[in-house]
């Protein structure tokens, strides 16, 4: 999924989604839950980094 498409689905600016992806900013808990549902993954999967 593109940043632009995710931004559309969560009603945020694509620049904000880009900040999430690059760890410049973090979505709040409610947004994490919404994103996890949209992507059909757990919140743990979203937060896990290696």
Image (tube, grey):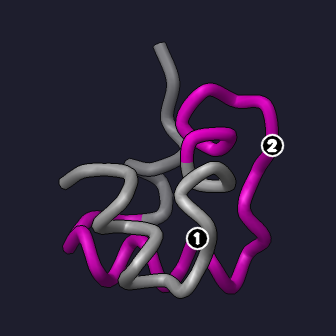
Task: Kindly identify the residue that appears in the image at 63 percent across and 78 percent down.
Answer: 31
Task: Kindly identify the residue that appears in the image at 79 percent across and 31 percent down.
Answer: 24
Q: What stretch is highlighted in magenta?
A: 18-42
* CA distance separating discs 2 and 1: 13 Å
Give yes or no for residue 37 being in the magenta stretch. yes
Please give the count of numbered marks on the rendered protein: 2
Could you say which is closer to the camera, residue 3 or residue 44?
3
The picture places residue 35, in percent across and down from the top left corner, at 43, 73
Element type at marker 2?
loop
Tags 2 and 1 in contact by the CB under 8 Å rule? no
Q: Image check: 34 left or right of 5?
A: right
Residue 27, compared with residue 50, is above or below; it is below
Give yes or no for residue 24 being in the magenta stretch. yes
Q: Which is closer to the viewer, label 2 or label 1?
A: 2
The picture places residue 44, in percent across and down from the top left corner, at 48, 54
The picture places residue 17, in percent across and down from the top left corner, at 57, 53
Q: Is most of the magenta stretch helix, strand or loop?
A: helix
Task: Kindly identify the residue that appears in the image at 76 percent across and 50 percent down.
Answer: 26
Q: Image check: 5 left or right of 12?
A: left
Could you say which is closer to the camera, residue 27 or residue 1?
1
Element type at marker 1?
helix
Mark 2 vs 1, N-terminal side: 2
Task: Check disc 1: other Cα within 10 Å, few if <14, some if 14-19, many if 20+.
Answer: some
**Mark number for residue 32?**
1
**Mark number for residue 4?**
none
The picture places residue 27, in percent across and down from the top left corner, at 72, 62
Q: Mark 2 points at which residue?
A: 25
Could you say which is closer to the camera, residue 10 or residue 42?
10
Q: Image check: 33 left or right of 6?
A: right
Task: Kindly identify the residue that appears in the image at 62 percent across and 67 percent down.
Answer: 13
């Amino acid at each position: 999924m593109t940043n632009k498409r995710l931004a559309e689905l969560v009603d945020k600016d694509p620049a904000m989604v880009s900040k999430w992806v690059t760890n410049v900013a973090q979505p709040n808990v409610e947004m994490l839950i919404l994103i996890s549902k949209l992507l059909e993954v757990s919140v743990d999967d979203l937060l896990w980094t290696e």
